[in-house]
Amino acid sequence: MSEEGATPDELIAIVTKRASFLAVLSSGAMEKRALRDELGVSRSTVYKAVRELKAYDLVERTNDGLRLTLAGRILESEYDTFRRRTEDVCRTRHLLSTLPADCGIPTALIENAETILPERHAPNHPIQYFERMVSDADCVRGLSPVALPQYVDLFYERSVSGGMAAELVLEQPVVKYLVTDYSDELREALEIGNLSVWETENTLPFGLIVAKGTTNEHDGVCVVVYNERGELRGLITNDTRNAVEWGHETFERFRNDATLVGGE
């Protein structure tokens, strides 16, 4: 007998409870014995699960065995998507918890993303990854709320000697620091024409690098996470098209609200 008056919460509960059965049946019709063998559960567990799923019209009996109904297939797919998103959040939540809740990080960035964290035996691991990413790029666009000496030296060398094009949006204190402590290097990089710098009065919620290589295979985006004291906590990196597009859009949004300091 169908649970015609089932609430969304009841459906969510049954889909969550019987997710493994729905996942197996998503590949095609299957008899109860095959379900039992595939999942490694008892006959009584299979019987109870099938009874519950049939009660909510999520599975049906056919000549080939049990199969998902249209409703069952839709909910199985949506649950699988939710499960994968949850895995993405679990993988990145250490860094997500450091960022402001309204910073605009989308699911496109964390989907299948890689996190780079400082480790006890390798505290500079994130910086080394960042350096490799910039060193391999032909063109980068970036946001930075801080100015680490390693960053300054890297961008100077890559833009002056390596021919890399760079567009950077920096917070006002960062620009002041560069003008005061690296005036010669900044002037030289700007005069060569590979570097453009914008100054923003806004507080940048994170650092950002969008790197472009000679082929799309080398494109990637990296969010650099700092705590409120400006200490590097780690990186969230991704090379999917949606993530890279978000990176470009985010850079352009901050650039459009910034003032050009030098370059084109």
Image: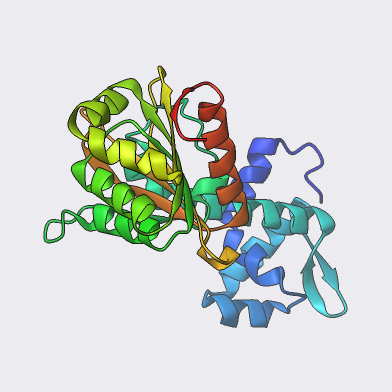
Q: Do we see residue 239 in this rendering? A: yes
Residue 38's quadrant in the figure? bottom right
Residue 93: x %, y % from top left? 37, 44
- Please name whichever residue, 15 or 87, is drawn nearer the observer in this view of the structure: 87
Residue 114: x %, y % from top left? 41, 57
Color style of the picture: rainbow
On screen, 122 above or below 25?
Answer: above
Q: Residue furthest left?
A: 121
Q: Do we see residue 228 in this rendering? A: no
Residue 249's quadrant in the figure? top right
Task: State left or right for residue 223 relative to residue 111.
Answer: left
- Please name whichever residue, 219 or 60, is drawn nearer the observer in this view of the structure: 219
For image coordinates 50% across by 37% down, the residue present is 105
Residue 66's quadrant in the figure? bottom right
What number of labels is visible? 0
- Please name whichever residue, 114 or 47, is drawn nearer the observer in this view of the structure: 114
On screen, 6 above or below 262?
Answer: below
Residue 67: x %, y % from top left? 78, 69
On screen, 127 above or below 148?
Answer: below
Task: State left or right for residue 99 relative to residue 80.
Answer: left
Residue 158: x %, y % from top left? 35, 55
- Please name whichever residue, 133 or 156, is drawn nearer the observer in this view of the structure: 156
Q: Residue furthest right?
A: 63
For image coordinates 16% across by 54% down, the residue present is 123
For image coordinates 30% across by 56% down, the residue present is 131
For image coordinates 23% across by 32% down, the residue present is 230
